[in-house]
Amino acid sequence: MSPMSAAPLLLGLGAIVLAQSVGIAPAQAQQFDVPASARSAIVDQTNAYRQEKGLAPLSESAGANHEAQAYANYLAETKKTGHSADGQGPFQRLRAAGVKFCKFRGENWHESWTRPNRASPDAAMAAAMRFWKHSPGHERALRSASTEIGVGVAGWKHGNQWYYQEIQVFIDTSCLKGAKPASSVSVKGDGGDGDIEDPIPSLPDRNPGRLP
């Protein structure tokens, strides 16, 4: 598809790296509004997927939502990528934000961009969910022994490119409520600091290109 085609095409980081490698100068960034329904769609689709797998739904964590949104904004504005682009990992960001939890279960991250037209929020959220479901480490986070989820969605325009960033954070708060974890996934402790009982496999710092 030509870069000037009117129909938006969701692209992954491979295309972004290519664009940067040919010397395209960074343009002024401008945030654009992403409706709250986009974040709700990720929560709803995550819980629908868990239901398909026989797992209990996740409740939203206000604190984790705030942390995830802040990190999504940071990635979208700076065009940085990965789970520790700001110098902290998701566990550290949650602690710094004052979020209380028993176990950190994982973070899912996704980026997509289109040009010259902006993709709809529905298309961008669908691309994120599709990628997470088909990537083993990310899919395991969707099924993790979590009780709560935090979601952040951000949109920024850089030049003629429209970027979406989506973040999911999974935590287990069952020890704070005296309840059992919501998932039946069998795990073994890592013998570490006690805050990460279910070691999620290292997630890639780059999302492969994915078409909608």
Image (tube, rainbow, N blue to C red):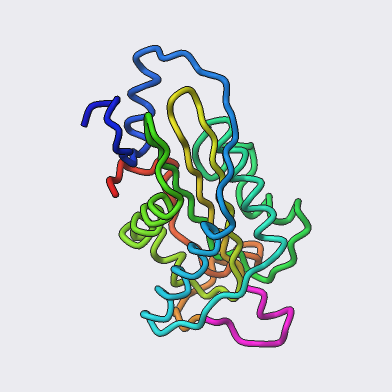
Q: Relative to 48, does residue 76 appear above or below in the rendering? A: above
Q: Is residue 109 left or right of residue 102?
A: left
Q: Relative to 132, does residue 6 appear above or below in the rendering? A: above
Q: Is residue 28 left or right of residue 99?
A: left
Q: Relative to 24, does residue 13 appear above or below in the rendering? A: below
Q: Is residue 168 left or right of residue 54?
A: right
Q: Which of the 4 quarters of the picture holds residue 151?
A: bottom right
Residue 186 on image: x %, y %? 44, 79
Of residues 154 and 192, the one nearer the viewer is 154
Magenta region includes residue 174:
yes
Of residues 38 and 152, the one nearer the viewer is 38
Residue 1 on image: x %, y %? 21, 32
Residue 137 visible in the displayed image:
no
Residue interval drawn in magenta: 172-182
**Residue visible at 61% across and 51% down in the picture:** 90
**Residue visible at 66% across and 87% down in the picture:** 179
**Residue visible at 45% across and 48% down in the picture:** 110
Residue 67 on image: x %, y %? 67, 53
